[in-house]
Amino acid sequence: MGEGIGLNTNNPAGFWIRFGALLLDALIVGVPLVIISLILTGGSGDEIYTNIISFLYTLLLPIFWNGYTIGKRICGIRIVKVSDGLPPSLGTMLLRNVVAGLIYGFTLGIAAIVSATMVGAREDKRSLHDFIAGTEVVHERL
């Protein structure tokens, strides 16, 4: 138990740093994926491979890379479990990405707007998908 309970809870990452990490992930990972997809499919509009790789990136990289994606690492923030401050597990990331994604889709994006508002307004900066998965996004410790 190297991290310990609650070591990161007083340093939550806010809206703009999380948004910046998301933009960096889109630029560094998303744009090359779209270009490769266009080359492989000849521009047929079939984005299934891009969607699968993007999904696996956001699902698996935080599990294997201590709560980071490339954008989060550059911004100095990471995903941790609220219960113990450790990086997320596969079950945690499935809740965070799949279950929350379904909720965002079923509400036609209204829940995503509520979630972004929560990150901006709440003291703990936790979003809807953080509550669903029991996670938080924190600044890495110096």
Image (spheres, helix red, strand yellow):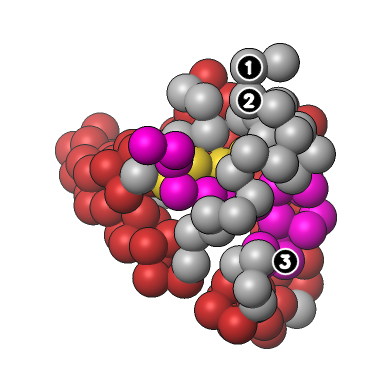
User: Are the two marked residues, 1 and 2, in contact with CB atoms closer than 8 angstroms?
Assistant: yes
Q: Is residue 90 above or below residue 77?
A: above
Label 1 Cα neighbours within 10 Å, binned few <14 / some 14-19 / many ≥20: few
Label disc, if present, on residue 2 of the rendered structure: 1
Q: Nearer the viewer, mark 3 or mark 1?
A: 1
Circle 3 sits on which residue? Answer: 128
Q: How many labels sit on residues?
A: 3
Q: Is residue 44 above or below residue 115?
A: above
Residue 127 position by quadrant: bottom right
What amino acid is found at the position of numbered circle 2 in the picture?
A: Glu
Circle 2 sits on which residue? Answer: 3
Looking at the rendering, the stretch of residues picked out in magenta corresponds to: 126-142
Q: Is residue 58 above or below residue 138?
A: above
Q: Residue at the spot x=38%, y=70% of the render?
A: 16
Viewer-proximal residue among 131 and 141: 141
Label disc, if present, on residue 22 of the rendered structure: none
Please indicate, yes or no, whether residue 60 appears anywhere in the rendered image: no
Q: Is residue 134 left or right of residue 24?
A: right
Q: Label 3's element?
A: helix
